[in-house]
Amino acid sequence: MTHEDLAAQYCATVSQNVALAEGYLFESFSECSMSAKIKRSVKDIDFNKIRTFLYEYEIETETGNWKRLGFEREISDYSVYSFSPSGKKLATFKKVSNESKKESAEYEVEVWNNDSEQGISLASKFSTKTSHGEIMMDGWFGDFNWSPDESCAVYVAQKPLKTSLSFFSPPEEGKAVGDQFLYKEDWGEKYAGVFDLSLYIVNFENHKVAEVPNIDPSLCPGQPQWAKQGTYIVYTAWKTLPRKLGIIYCYQRSCGLFSANVSLLALELSINTSSEKIGKIEIEHKAMTQNDILALFPRISKCGEKLVWLSRKEGFSTHSGAFRLALGNLSDDGQIEAQKNLVDITVNPASDEEFPGLWSSSLPSACWAKNNSEIFLSSNLRSRECVLKINADDGKVEIVNEGKGFDESLPKSSASVLSVGSQGRNALISFSNPNSPKKCAVYLHNGKMICGPDFGPISITKDVKVPKELISKAKQSFEGLQFEVLKFKPKNENLSFEAILIKPNSSEKVAFPLIVIPHGGPHSAHSTSFVAEYAFLCGIGYALLLVNYRGSTGFGEGPLNSLPKNIGTHDVDDMVQATREVCGRDDMDENRVALWGGSHGGFLACHLTSLFPDMFKVAMIRNPVVNLASMVTSSDIPDWCYVETLGQESFKDGKLGLMNAEDLNKMAKVSPILNVKNVKAATLLGLGAKDRRVPHSQGLEWFNALRANEVTCKLLFYPEDTHALDKPGTSADFLLNAVLWLKAYL
């Protein structure tokens, strides 16, 4: 197979991947039809970026027919592309390129009306000018939330940067001298250059933008929501002292919910028609969850009177953990009344059938349904991602994708919620499994499901010509994949763990080469979702074993907490047990076993190749942790090194100033680098130069040690990529290099 053929086969598979960024469901009052607007993210290898397309459908409730409305529309150039809750308005923010303005960012704002009688019209157009810096629409800090009357929106943006002058520059009013190179602390991995955030309200009718004043400077706000019919906003705020630690994928960062009465500010924005900025208005911000270490993702009911959020009163030290779903009523003074927990923590599920607790990474922007009596959300449940419907009165949990309609359509599927409908009757969801890319469906209030059509392929490069028959062949290949969820029980342990085995389709009796894949984290999980890269590897003849070792999310709080202080032992033991048991099957070739892992998965791959050098012949490793003693002072998450090595109580604020030789010695002892001399496996490494999580010096340490020991190895260094190595060009390059590596050495 030539490299051109390999690239074409990759494109044929990955072009059929469906990554859904966001979805809206607009319900008619008659209940006979609905409309769905769905954003799909697509990899563009030529420009090494993610592009976004909008799909629109009309859905007939009676027939279950999804009618495509026109051609998909590219919306990649917009920082904000948001439909109002009623579906009658669309707001877009497009950044104006202006290199001369370093202190702030300018956005061109348009608001479009969609009226059934007058059609589509441009209602307003204006510029934010120098109001703020970059708008955050990242899914963590950022949220764009329309006011109940749809005249305003609240969102998150960076504050304008304060610039300083050189000692040799002419003076300028309001600018300090000599602080040009003053250190500014950001939020670490993926948030380089994100320093100070604030909340902003835009009035679409008067073309005014104003910062919400008086937010505590020691807090970083995000996730704003309107409440109490537009008089209040409720938001999450994270502590920034004594220092900012990396926040992406880190749910343990101390945060709480706050409320602010913004009625005066909103009124001033609505009546002030002058070109002058809004005058100073004092606003009081009230803490709503003073007793909770973690409270985030507030979601207000459609009536504006109820609130649900993810809560963990006692907090946790691992980077992920189980949450409670809390509910309360909003009082007239912006406080929470009658608070209760709808879903509590499950420590040790008695069986695989028992609900393991709530393992959600967020809440849908629109999650309230059925007259504010139900909440829809997504959660990991063991090796699946599931849609949960939770009763707001008694907390009863129903797993939607274990219902009749789902398992008939896609057995053992994983699913997530995109949005609850505008009238709160139905829910727009997505679902997939390892042999079927994501599709959308509407889950009706009567329990039935209306499945949508395939999205179809989108080309990811103009430089590789992919014949139609190759796309069809790739589809047949991944649709024929076989998968199963396997269960394992470690010796002398009450806990169990799982793995997902995916095999190529073959009518002949074949022993497949096996790629073993530990997930990163370590507190995350593989799920039975479609992953295009995995489908591609299976399509060219490799079986995959995705191991959810002890410590993975979705299995209960007790199993997760069993791993801290035991990394490098429990997780390694589970990987070896799963590999040995699967390699004992007739359809696996025990002499051709490879490893694929990144981050903590890379940590495990390094351990496994050094501790079991004859079991694994090849390793493909991305940004691995190899030496915790050297990583602890250079990573944006030093607490990870403490918690996973020394236990959950080991890291306190300011701990870095109190490091001692005993701690560093323990970190060194659990590090793969101590046994690197044993490695035999041909090793391919991929490193991101801008990785703040696991600095590339970690991978270089491993690479240089392998070279010194004359082990076959190769290093791919990506100068513009970060920890995940997820830029389209990077992920494609590493995968195709990995395939060539496998063909050469496995």
Image (cartoon, rainbow, N blue to C red):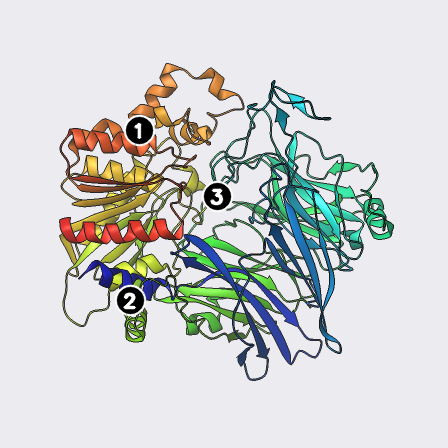
Q: Amino acid at mark 3?
A: Val
- SS of the residue under disc 3: loop
The x, y position of residue 84, in whole percent, is 69, 62
Instruction: Name the residue tied to disc 2.
Output: 481
Q: Amino acid at mark 1?
A: Val
Using a 10 Å C-alpha cutoff, classify the residue at mark 3 as few (fewer than 14 neighbours), some (14 to 19) or many (20 or more).
some
Who's the residue at 68% across and 38% down the image?
Answer: 289
Q: Is residue 480 above or below residue 545?
A: below
Image-based side of 350 in relation to 247, left or right: left
Viewer-nearest residue: 200 or 99: 99
Q: Residue at x 68, y 30 (%)?
A: 217
* Residue at 43% over, 32% down: 640
Camera-side residue of 414 and 464: 464
Front position among marks 1 and 3: 1
Q: Where does label 1 land, which residue?
A: 670
Mark 1 vs 2: CB contact within 8 A? no
Disc 2 residue crowd, few under 14, some 14–19, many 20+, Cα 10 Å: some
**Mark 3 highlights which residue?**
347
